[in-house]
Amino acid sequence: MENKEISWLKEQLKVGIKPGLDRVKLLLQKLGHPEKKLKIIHIAGTNGKGSTLTFLRNILSEHSYEVGTFTSPYIEHYNERISINGSPISDDEMSHYIKLLKPLCNEISLTEFGKPTEFEIVTCIALQYFKDKNVDYVILEAGLGGRMDSTNVVNPLLSIITMIGYDHLDVLGDSIEEIATEKAGIIKPNAPVFTNEIKSEAFHVLESKAKQTQSSIYRLHKDFDYSWGNSYEDGEEFNFISDELTINGLRSTMTGKHQIENASLAIYSAKKLSELEGIFLSIEKIIKSIERTTWVGRFEFIHRNPTIILDGAHNVEAFEQLIDTINNRYNPSHIKLLISVIKGKPIEPIIDMLSSQYEDITITSFDFDKSYSKKELLQKFYKCDIIVSENWKSTVNDFIDQQETNEVLVVTGSLYFISVVRSYLNGR
């Protein structure tokens, strides 16, 4: 059963999203500015943040560094958002920090800035926890956007911006340039920037901000690159290439071309960090760390015989990557899709894209406040040749109960949906 402190923290979700950094700055000031005592790598982007962060964390931890990571959303347990070398903060420690911050939050709620949000509070908990644990490095993942995100109160050693796409249009803007401007907000003076974003309209924005802040910017296919070897059902082979470092024979169990790009971004960022910090990187340890990197809910094989794959694609660009990864491994006629997309996401273009590739698609509702109801889904897709359901468990169970099949069930859509299905399958 969840303790009362963590329950209180989750209740602050009702405060909603409130743009602005004033509340976070006030909280950190009251805590004595733990962020100023940390060596931080800041990551923003639309897709690939979590994977890139995990590749980079593993490279550093393989070299015996203590690495704090702050990620969102969580897939299995709330505490996993705040971890050190992959081990989440304990419930007792989480309770300790909530007790520490609760009276500070009450003080701030009486000011003109109002109540801190759940994300603002958990950001401050992470920074204080990492400072108290005296970690060597912190990798901080922006939650929404970058410029006005709660994490954007730090002066990082370096910034990483992953692929930029159309997501959270109601908050970040409805053009690639507007969204890139928000992501570019994490670029700080004299801190180098690394990106695998190659779209000219997005890169131009990042490059412009880097020039303003006198920060060097390094880009995939220009400053670093990869050559793609073989694809396997459960991974990729590739080589990493740059002027400073070449590594042959890399193997990743993270599937898809986009994961090779994320791994390459992490390797090059680690190489430049080693130059900044005067630390030695072993090629052997980099190879080992890439091979052992996994990230739940990203083309994850959750069940065998028959095969069930979970993938938290939740915007158009992520679904394009998912389609490429599926079709590179399987006959599209053998694919069954179970999908749930929450409100605020471009559901019609996503379903149009999937319908052009696959014949067997079930779209479902699930127990979540932003989920579409079955009635709403029927109204949207009554003319489409897809199944609309409100009982995703029966779809999963019926698939598993087949005796012999060469079909593959891909469960995709909202990360919240993936989390629910993953928990059910692990329990089953």
Image: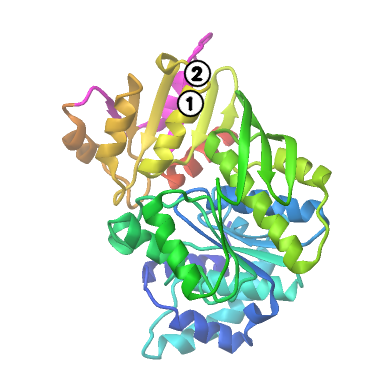
Q: Residue at x 54, y 74 (%)?
A: 214
* Three-letter residue code for mark 2: Tyr
Asked which colour scheme the image uses, the reply is: rainbow
Q: Does residue 210 appear left or right of residue 227 in this picture? A: left
Label 1, secondary structure: give it. helix
* Three-letter residue code for mark 1: Ile
In this rendering, does residue 109 appear at all? yes
Q: Residue 157 falls in which quadrant of the image?
A: bottom right
In the rendered image, the residue lying farthest to the top is 404
Q: Which part of the image, by quadrant, shows the C terminus?
A: top right
Whether residue 403 is in magenta: the answer is yes
Q: Which residues are magenta?
A: 384-413
Q: Nearer the viewer, residue 96 or 147?
A: 147
Give percent across and percent down for residue 353. 31, 31
Q: Residue at x 65, y 56 (%)?
A: 269
Give percent across and percent down for residue 344. 29, 52
Label 2, secondary structure: give it. loop
Q: Residue at x 30, y 26 (%)?
A: 355
Q: Which part of the image, by quadrant, shows the N terminus?
A: bottom right
Q: Residue at x 44, y 56 (%)?
A: 203
Above or below, comparing residue 176 to residue 362 in the picture:
below
- Tell me the distance, in whole angstroms, between the alpha carbons under discs 1 and 2: 6 Å
Q: Residues within 10 Å of mark 2 (few under 14, many from 20)?
A: some
Q: Nearer the viewer, residue 203 or 403?
A: 203
Q: Which mark is residue 326?
A: 1
Q: Which residue is mark 2?
A: 330
Whether residue 12 is in magenta: the answer is no
Above or below, comparing residue 330 to residue 124 in the picture:
above
Asked whether the beta carbons under mark 1 and mark 2 sit within 8 Å of each other, the answer is yes
